[in-house]
Amino acid sequence: MDEREILTRFRDGTLDRGQAMALLAGIAPAPVQAAFAGRAAPAVPAAPAAAAAVEPVTAVAPVAAAAPDVPDAPDALVVPAAPAPPVAPPSAAAPVASAASAAPGGGEAAAVAPVAVVGMALRQPQAPDTAAVWRQMRRGHSTASAPPPGRAATGTGHYLDAIEDFDAEFFGIGPADAALTDPQERLFLETAWEALEDAGCTGSRLDALRTDDGTPRSVGVYAGAGGGEYALLAAAAGAATADERGDGGPVPRSDTWNLANRVSALLHLTGPSLTLDTAESSVLVALHHALAALRRGECRAALVGGVRLLLHPSGRPPGAGEAVGAVVLKPLELALADGDTVHCLVRGSAVGHVPAGPDAAGAPAERLVRAALRESGPGTDAAPPREDAASVAAAVGDAGAATGMAVLARAVLRLRHGTPLPRPGRPGAEDADPAGTAGPVRAAVCARGAGGVEAYAVLEEYAPEPAAPPPHPAATERDRARAEPAGSPGAEEAELVLLSAPTPAHLVATAQRLADFLASAGPAPGLAALARSLRTGRAAMSCRYAALVTGTEPLARLLAGLVPEDATDLRLGGGDPLRLGAVPETRAYLAALWAGRRLDQLRDLWLAGVDVDWAALEQGRPGAGAAVVPLPPSAFLRSTHRLGGGPAR
């Protein structure tokens, strides 16, 4: 390959900058690897030849760690500041696009490594949580209705309930600030938290998501949202207040850039943080950006979601709807190494502008399909069954910026459950694999914004590797004997179960929710997996409860009987009175207690406020690879927050 051919291939995107420089220097570069940017952890594959392209969008908010008026996170959500060198900005000259996505109409390109969906939270009309959304999808009926009581709206639409309610205390936000905060921002904050809890990423496992330079909590936030209609309501309320008092008072912002930034600020997330608005395709464009950031190594995980509320009469066209949702993404190999629950895989994506007009719309859309299929690897010669705005119209109507989220959620849940879903205008459910092809089932998601920005992605069911054979009986007996407390031969091993919340009332509500889950019909996780998930995947807040139990039935009874007085309330002072958390030797001491299964001492130290890195302790325990299972989210105790205390709109 001569110099001209090298430069030609670099210009066409076939070679990235590093490969071209190596070839020009006479050094054969390493083969292109379909993997992510190099990581310190051995479970993450090596650097890719290139990452996915980031297409232009109609509006991208400034990437900011926090807005100036974002309040500090409450003690329950603060991660101790860890000194780390600053992250070096990427070189402007370094290409970041793969051949497939940089030139969707171009030549062949290697598949990229899959990304796993490891957490999800949803709220749609007549469906307040993910389980209810799935039940509604299976029925396939329309959610169109008259406006809920208290909503100053007319006409039929697809409405969420109680959009003015918010648990400000959970996030340490004052009532006045909560009333000025756009309900879209409030609802997205709660949903983002639930998605991160579903992924087991609000505790020490979140701290363990570090960049190559050691920066913790490397999670990007990519949100899709439309206009800030709340400011229009505030303008009317402010005018009325000005007539009465002679001043307008504080008003909400009219923009939506803080939607993502506030999540990052309150949870101390250090990855990219941006809000995008490309109308109906906003969330799928956000997904495309998040995939590119993961492949470039800008973050170890990503939260992708969107929200749309009908707050002002000007934003309520016929058939309009509301929805909110979020998913958590991780590179598949990292997700497997971390023991995450994998709902499905994202294999490829593409974004582009589709010109207006019936004659011009076909070819660009096909170009995006081909680009996403090339990224998806073998088995995607033909486009899989597609979910689009028509698929979700009965559930959410015209949901604006949340349309793409509803489309994505439908595909994720269909692949996760392996169940076909009804399609509009078709009797019964659609076959998820109509051609009967071999291999994993795939689904496509697509949305086109009102301005012409279209996004297309290919998802795939996750087929885990066959489970390893059980250990030799003798080895099992040795392991069990080693774990039993001294003096209790043959006793069942106890597990340390931890719960925490910002207040005792929150703690009791969360305990009752978990007790109901354990007592309900259907499969429930084993005690060990449940205990590990709570220890490593949930944030340690100020009000705490801990129990040593040997089964889920006694645990359910304990949780059902919990009262506020059972909580250890560190808000009253006395947390970590001996300041053990500030002593470096404490980590070795905690590890020794864990190795010796001194769970009662570990329980007492945690209740006293000592910071315990449970994720680090679990690394050396057999079976820690299955550490995370989906559990009910923490309970929110919502109250109503309205502009000026007036009626909800």
Image: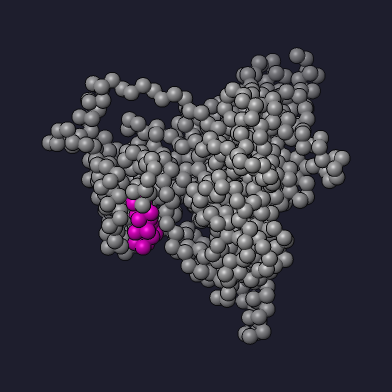
Q: Quadrant of the N terminus?
A: top right
Give the residue at the far top of this rendering: 1
The residue segment tinted magenta is 499-515
What residue sits 62% from the left and 85% below the top? 245
| Residue located farthest toward the front when viewing the structure as drawn | 427
| Residue 84 in sight here | no
* Residue 269 appears left or right of 546: right
Secondary structure that dominates the magenta span? helix
The question of residue 510 being in magenta is answered with: yes
Verify whether residue 214 appears in magenta.
Answer: no
> What is the quadrant of residue 77 in the picture?
bottom left
At 55% from the left and 29% from the top, the residue drawn is 38
* Colour option used: one colour
Left-right relation of 304 to 267:
right
Which is nearer the eye, 529 or 255?
A: 529
Q: Is residue 120 left or right of residue 147?
A: left
User: Outermost residue, left direction?
Assistant: 487
Is residue 336 visible in the rendered image? The answer is yes
> Where residue 92 appears, x then y in whole percent?
70, 38
Quadrant in which the C terminus appears: bottom right
Count of numbered tags: 0
Q: Nearer the viewer, residue 523 or 482?
A: 523
Q: Position of residue 464 (x, y in %)?
A: 48, 28
Query: Left or right: where does residue 452 sit relative to residue 289?
Result: right
State whether residue 398 is above or below residue 166: above
On screen, 499 above or below 490?
below
Kindly identify the residue that appears in the image at 69 percent across and 54 percent down: 398
**Residue sitting at x 51%, y 28%:** 463
Question: Looking at the picture, how far across and down is residue 163, in whole percent?
Answer: 56, 63
Q: Position of residue 159 (x, y in %)?
A: 61, 60
Instruction: Using the image, determine if residue 626 lies above or below residue 584.
Output: above
